[in-house]
Image: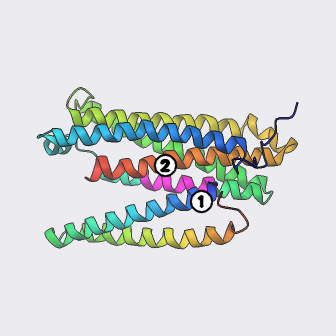
Amino acid sequence: MDIPYIVHARPDTGVNNGKLGVWLFLASEVMLFGALFSTYVFLRVGASDWHTWHSEAGLSIPIGTTNTIVLITSSITMVMAWASLMMKEFGKFRLYFGLTIALALVFMLFKAIEYNAKFSHGHFPGTNNFLAIYYVLTGLHALHILGGIIVNSYLIGPGAKLWRTNAAQFTCRIEAAGLYWHFVDLVWIFLFPTLYLL
Amino acid sequence: MSLKAFHLFFIATSVLLAVGLGIMTLQDFLERHAMAQLGWSLLSFVAALALILYATRILKKLKHVGFL
């Protein structure tokens, strides 16, 4: 049995089913991160020691900036991978998509270095409210990056077989993965100034 | 919204972040006269400009792709 609207847009929604599903999922993600950002605001407004906690935490702005550059670059390579598929250049797709995964691993490496430095200085989630929300927000974001790495690794590995049998559907899958990846990167674009700079 | 539209939105947000970072570090330079801050400020503005140029390039490259 063929499943309809996996490539072509449904007349009533204007998009294919996969894209609609991803956007519904991302809407729930907006609520999740939105609630946590609200928690951050309430904790910050209610705390008189916030600036002391923030400076004591000693977050590394160079590492945060590097991770921001890494994620922006990974979004660019993700779009390049998708564009390569639309131009039927599978070799280029593998290169750009592989780079996206590699950059995500670089992000995770820097995050691990950062967490390790915090733990070695005795900065744990229970130390104060700033570190509590810092670990919750960045930890949840890192889990999303990990999820992206797993899905993208499947798509460049065993999932890539679909390219030979149904190229259009595979391109739609990469677009859906790209939408998720952009959302995760966009969360970081808000997390970086909120936690590191302000 | 297609990946093309979301990507352009993402790049626009990144440009705002780079400009904000540039202004912040420039203010810091004007207050403390730390040359490193001026360097970071210039780098941020260059990054913002590079992202704008990239966005116009990708817009041309993906002109046959819709925004939905």
Instruction: Judge by depth and name the residue closer to the eye, A190 or A24.
Output: A24
Task: Name the kind of residue labelled 1 in the image.
Answer: Ala
Highlighted magenta segment, given as a residue range: A68-78
Q: The N terminus of chain A appears in which quarter of the rendering? A: top right
Q: Is residue B44 above or below residue A183?
A: below
| Mark number displayed over residue A181 | none
Residue marked by disc 2: A185
| Count of marks overlaid on the render | 2
Residue marked by disc 1: B5
Corner quadrant of residue B6:
bottom right
Residue in the image at 37% along x and 47% along y: A191
Task: Name the kind of residue labelled 2 in the image.
Answer: Asp
The reply, left or right, for residue A75 in relation to residue B35 is right
Chain letter for the residue marked with disc 1 in the picture: B
| Residue furthest top in the image | A126
CA–CA distance in space, label 2 to label 1: 15 Å
Corner quadrant of residue A129:
top left
